[in-house]
Amino acid sequence: MLEVTGLKKSFHGREILSGVDLTVEKGDVLAVLGPSGGGKTTLLRCLNYLERADAGQMTFIGRTMDMPRLSRKEIAAYRRHTAFVFQSFNLFSNKTALQNVTEGLIVPRKIPRAQAEERAMAALEKVGLADRRDAYPSQLSGGQQQRVAIARAVAVRPDVIFLDEPTSALDPELIGGVLEVIRGLAEDGMTMVIVTHEVNFARHVSTRVLFMDQGQVLTAAPTAEFFEEQKLERVQSFLRSLDRKDD
Ligand SMILES: Nc1ncnc2c1ncn2[C@@H]1O[C@H](COP(=O)(O)OP(=O)(O)O)[C@@H](O)[C@H]1O
Ligand SMILES: [Mg+2]
């Protein structure tokens, strides 16, 4: 469904992504793992054109695009098929949970308000927050705010959701609830690309794992193969270092 080849990105002359290839099939949950500073966020942002790639080809639902050359109109058309969940939630602080979710429906997608609210309520229901529809972000916990952000992503009925470390800004006791919501989406067959340090979550929920280090994909494999037949010492030592943090 989404295939990228040769994705490159530099900042101030320093190459951050050095020719990344990846494939996501419909229904895949692709977990992106790797050390901090390896380019995971930059990759995800390039995939949603929040950053402009310097080179790379993207094929999305059968259409091939030259990533550096896409026009604003083409980017807007592509983004109607995607959603992005940020590490820091990025909710509007002056809007309620419901308004945060309907915001992407009413103006950008021209959905009538009543219908947008119905869809938004279904999405809030899905993340377990229907009863907090009128709460402002400041009245919600971090975990609840992130669940609203996930409801906002779901409500646009995207073909793929990109999630950048959706639980890393949360207190430990709030992480589980958010991961549970994401696991539910995976069970519904939602296609997702998720950058995460939650290795157990990746092991049990993802269908494929991609490991990035220093702007390159070291390996990409089906999840069971990635964890059980991992031959790369660099990946093994990374996984061991996370295990130690869990202790
Ligand atoms: N907007 C930017 N301008 C300059 N450098 C950036 C920018 N965004 C990221 N970088 C640099 O790119 C490298 C990779 O960052 P990032 O994609 O955030 O990695 P990760 O998400 O794997 O931790 C880092 O060295 C970071 O400082
Ligand atoms: Mg990052």
Image: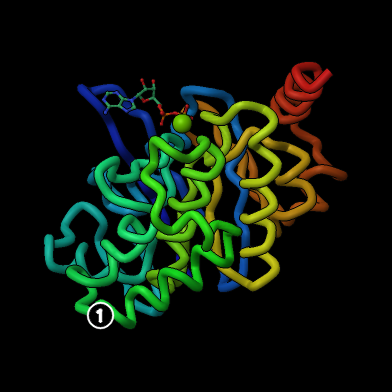
Q: Which residue is mark 1?
A: 111
Task: Name the one closer to the observer, 147 or 157.
Answer: 147
Which quadrant of the figure contains the C terminus? top right
Q: Residue at x 78, y 40 (%)?
A: 200
Picture layout, residue 73 above or below residue 37? below
- Give residue 63's position: percent from left, percent from top: 33, 76
Q: Is residue 146 left or right of residue 109?
A: right
Q: Is residue 34 left or right of residue 47?
A: right
Q: Is mark 1 within 8 Å of ligand 2?
A: no
**In the current view of this chain or complex, which residue is farthest to the left?**
72
Task: Name the one closer to the observer, 10 or 27.
Answer: 27
Picture layout, residue 17 above or below residue 222? above
Q: Which amino acid type is marked by label 1?
A: Ile
Task: Name the one closer to the observer, 102 or 188.
Answer: 102
Can residue 217 be seen in this snapshot? no
Q: Is residue 85 left or right of residue 190?
A: left
**Judging from the image, what secondary structure is the residue with disc 1 in?**
loop
Q: Residue at x 65, y 37 (%)?
A: 175
- Give residue 108's position: percent from left, percent from top: 20, 69
Q: Residue at x 58, y 25 (%)?
A: 35
Can residue 81 be seen in this snapshot? yes
Picture layout, residue 115 above or below residue 148? below
- Give residue 209's position: percent from left, percent from top: 66, 48
